[in-house]
Amino acid sequence: MPFRLRQPECLSRPPRHPRHRAADRCNFPLRACAARRYLQADQQPAVAVPNIPNKLRYMQIETERFIRRHGITEFSFNPHFPVNTLLLMRGAVAAQMEGLLDSYVAAVMHHMWEEPKKMDDPAIVAAALTQSGLDARRLLELAQSPDVKQRLVDNTARSVERGSFGAPTFFVGAEIYFGKDQLGEVEVEIRCTT
């Protein structure tokens, strides 16, 4: 069953004071829109928490723990992060259509986190993919096709319908897990279901 968020009660109940009824009716779409944006968590952590120093410091500590725990030796923080990932997501759909998704993901992750590059610049993405042995021209051309764009929209809609609200989100059967810190729980769920 898909995950559903209930509309907050404050957005669905009538205003309490009669004088405010007209104003509240006029503002309802704005309040509902603001709530949806909040619930969608549509900002990357680097954008959402710059003014919360303790949270940003904790995120850095947790990243260092994750790196140690998983024996990651080639990680470098990308100074261009956060980047707009729309081209990269479309490229992933194109790579999947071409049977190259694993190679594509490895290349993109390498150039994002091992040899950090500005991976929202199409020329830099093309050079990075070419350096990784992929046909960048073909993939980026395909990434701009209406079919790829629609597939990404459809994939995103299906993912949101299942309950996702950001990345990384993992599903094991109907169970949803969000965040890299949930990988242990994902492993346990996989073992329990096989």
Image (tube, rainbow, N blue to C red):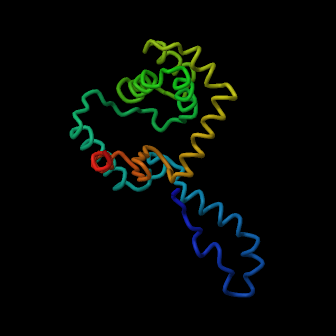
Q: Residue at x 33, y 30 (%)?
A: 76
Quadrant of residue 37 within the rendered picture: bottom right
144 or 150: nearer the viewer:
150
Quadrant of residue 98 within the rendered picture: top right
Image quadrant where one finds the C terminus: top left
Quadrant of residue 8 within the rendered picture: bottom right
In this rendering, does residue 61 appear at all?
no
Q: Residue at x 60, y 59 (%)?
A: 36
User: Residue 120: where, in percent of width, then height?
Assistant: 54, 29
User: Residue 116: where, in percent of width, then height?
Assistant: 40, 26
Does 34 sit above or below residue 131? below
User: Residue 48: where, in percent of width, then height?
Assistant: 48, 51
Numbered marks: total: 0
User: Relative to residue 13, is residue 164 drawn left or right?
Assistant: left
64 or 10: nearer the viewer:
10
Q: Residue at x 50, y 15 (%)?
A: 127
Q: Residue at x 68, y 82 (%)?
A: 15
In this rendering, does residue 137 appear at all?
yes
Residue extending furthest front?
194
User: Residue 126: where, in percent of width, then height?
Assistant: 53, 17
User: Relative to residue 131, is residue 158 drawn left or right?
Assistant: right
User: Relative to residue 116, is residue 72 drawn left or right?
Assistant: left
Does 125 sit above or below residue 72? above
